[in-house]
Amino acid sequence: MLTILFSARPDSWDQYDDPLNDALSDAGIGPFRVVTQAAADEVDYIVYAPDSGLTDFSVFPRLKAVLSLWAGVERIVGNPTITVPLARMVDAGLREGMQEWVTGHVLRHHLGMDAHILGTPGIWTKQVPPLARDRTVAILGLGELGAASAEALVHLGFRVSGWSRRPKALPGMQCHHGAEGLDTCLREAEIVVLLLPDTPATQNILNSRTLDLLPTGAVIINPGRGPLIDDDALLAALDSDRVGHATLDVFRVEPLPTDHPYWAHPKVTVTPHIASETRPATASKVVAENIRRKEAGEPMLNLVDRGVGY
Ligand SMILES: NC(=O)c1ccc[n+]([C@@H]2O[C@H](COP(=O)([O-])OP(=O)(O)OC[C@H]3O[C@@H](n4cnc5c(N)ncnc54)[C@H](OP(=O)(O)O)[C@@H]3O)[C@@H](O)[C@H]2O)c1
C-alpha cells in the first residue's frame, strides 16, 4: 500500500480529495491511500505546496519523490533535506490561466483601456491604438508559461520577442538568449512580461540598467516572481516616466504590506498573486502520472534541475 501525504494548505484538501483519488485510481498504481497526516515512516510520496509549512523532509525514510503543486519551486529547491526527485507543477489549467491573465493585461495596455474606464464623462477624446502587429511585446522566460503566453500573443498578431537561458526557436516570434539577447529584447519592448523563475541568476533582472534600455513609457507586467524586479529602481523609473505603468501580481513579501508604495502609486496595478492557479482536476492527473512513472521505473516528468534552481 502506497501512502501519499498531501501536504499543502489545509483548506485546499477539499478541492483535491476527489480529483487526486480519482486520478491515482485511473493511473493504476495499485493499492494506495492519500492522507493529510501519517506516521513519517509510512510516507512514500509527498504532494507539496509551501504553505503547508513542511520544511524537514529528512524524517521520511521511505520517501520516493516530492511532487510540487506549484510551478515556482524557489522555496523548496535549495532544501537540503530533500534527497529524492523533486517535480514541479506543469499543468494545463495553470498554462491556460496564465495565457488568459497575460493576454488580458497586455490588451489593457495595448488598447489604452484605462483612458475610457477612468476617463471623465462628457470628454470625447479619440486616440486610436496601433494594431497588435505594430506593438512589440517581450516575454522574459520562455518555459511552460512564457511560451504559452507568447503563443497566445502571436495568435493575436503582436510582434513578440522572448528571452530564455538556452537558445530556443518558437513559431512566429524572435527568440533571444544570453546577456546580449536580454538587452536586444528590452530595447524593442513596449510591453515586457516577466515569466522567469526566481533563481540567483534572475533576481533583479529588471534593475536601473535594464529598465533604462526600454523605450520610454514601456509597460512592465510581472506574473513571475517579486524578486525579479529591483523595486526601488522600478519606482524611480515610474516616477521619471521612463516606465509608463507596472502591473504586478507577485512581490518580495506577500501579501504586499499595506504601507508598500506600490499600493498607492498611480502607475502601478497590484493583483494579489492570482495570475494563474494550479487547477486540481488537471494537476491531479499530472501528480498521478508522475507517481505511476516512478513506480514503473520510468523517467519522471517535470523534474527540477537543482543546479540551476528551476
Ligand atoms: N503569478 C502566478 O500566479 C504564477 C503561477 C505559476 C507560476 N508563476 C511563476 O512563473 C514562473 C515560470 O513558470 P514556468 O512553468 O514557465 O517555468 P519554466 O518552464 O521552468 O520556464 C522558465 C523559463 O525561464 C528561463 N530562465 C530561467 N533562468 C533563466 C536565466 N538565468 N536567464 C534567462 N532565462 C532563464 C528558462 O530558460 P530555458 O528555457 O533555457 O530553461 C525558461 O524559458 C514560475 O517559476 C513561477 O515563479 C507564477
Image: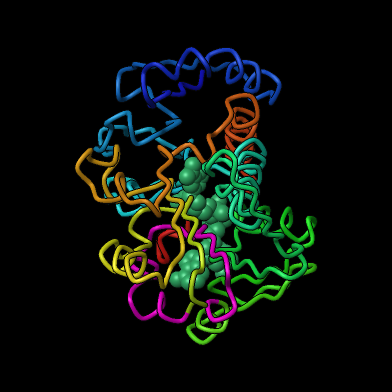
How far across and how far down the image is residue 94, in percent?
60, 39
Bounds of the magenta segment: 186-213
Q: Is residue 211 above or below residue 280?
A: below
Residue 304 belongs to magenta span: no
Q: Is residue 302 above or below residue 220?
A: above
Residue 300 versus residue 113: which sits nearer the camera?
113
Quarter of the view holding residue 164:
bottom right
- Does residue 218 appear anywhere in the picture? yes
Q: How are the colours assigned in the image?
A: rainbow
How far across and how far down the image is residue 90, in percent?
59, 44
- Does residue 71 appear anywhere in the picture? no
Quarter of the view holding residue 50:
top left
Q: Is residue 69 left or right of residue 23?
A: left
Which residue shows up at 79% across the image and 68% down it?
Answer: 172
Q: In this view, does 59 lie above or below 128?
A: above
Residue 193 belongs to magenta span: yes
Q: Quadrant of the C terminus?
A: bottom left
Which residue shows up at 43% across the image and 40% down it?
Answer: 271
Q: How many labels does the image show?
A: 0
